[in-house]
Amino acid sequence: MAAVVGAAPVAGAVSPIEWIASGSATPQSVQPARPTVTLGDYCQAQSEPAMTADGKTAYCARVQYTDAYVWSATPDLVATDPHFPVDPGDTCLNPDAVTTGTGERTMYCNPTQSGRQHGTLVWQLQP
């Protein structure tokens, strides 16, 4: 059977009714593959989420107090640039910040409790 476009039949064309009745599936939109990235590597601002080698979602997040962006497991601000790890006692700026320091240890930004620099914010290991 010929399909009708306007008033003239088109030879060899399949009508929408025949196409549906034939059992043909509706064409699916194909999602482009996400690039594979490494957490901590630099990325461009406004980058779309990507995937890590183990299949987890990675977000391009801004490093707090800088204009740098790195791939992160969360879309939240990153407290420190992973290319410049911090050590206990290094100065920090945000008392609510948490980061991973040298040796993959979790550190918190807290004020010092005693000494000449009492109250200064520094990176400290978890108590």
Image (cartoon, rainbow, N blue to C red):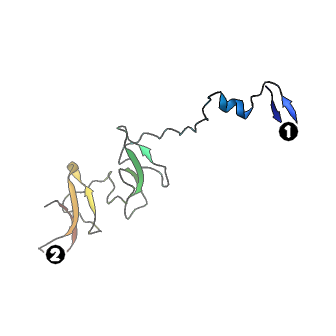
Residue at 35% x, 50% y is 73
| x, y percent for residue 121 | 23, 70
Where residue 113 appears, as percent x and y from the top left, is 13, 72
Q: Say which element carries label 1.
A: loop
Q: Residues within 10 Å of mark 1 (few under 14, many from 20)?
A: few
Whether residues under marks 1 and 2 lie with C-beta atoms below 8 angstroms apart, the answer is no
Q: Where is residue 57 in the image (x, y as percent from the top left)?
A: 39, 46
- CA neighbours of label 2 inside 10 A, class few (<14), some (14 to 19), many (20+): few
- Image point 21% across, 68% down: which residue? 110
Picture quarter containing residue 66?
Answer: bottom left
Check the image and name the residue furthest to the right: 7
Q: 106 or 8: nearer the eye?
A: 8
User: Which residue is tagged 2?
Assistant: 118
Between disc 1 and disc 2, the foreground one is 1
Q: Spatial distance from mark 1 to mark 2, Cα to Cα?
A: 84 Å
Q: Is residue 108 above or below residue 112?
A: above
Rendered image: mark on residue 75:
none
Amino acid type at image mark 1: Gly
Q: Is residue 31 shown left or right of residue 12? A: left
- 93 vs 41, left or right, is left
Q: Which residue is drawn at the image coordinates 53% and 39% (left, top)? A: 32
Residue 120 coordinates in the image, percent (x, y)? 21, 72
Decide if residue 42 is on the left or right side of residue 106.
right
What is the secondary structure assignment of the residue under circle 2?
A: loop
Q: Which of marks 1 and 2 is nearer the N terminus?
A: 1
Q: Quadrant of the N terminus?
A: top right
Question: Which residue has dot 1 on it?
Answer: 6
Q: Which amino acid does label 2 sit on?
A: His
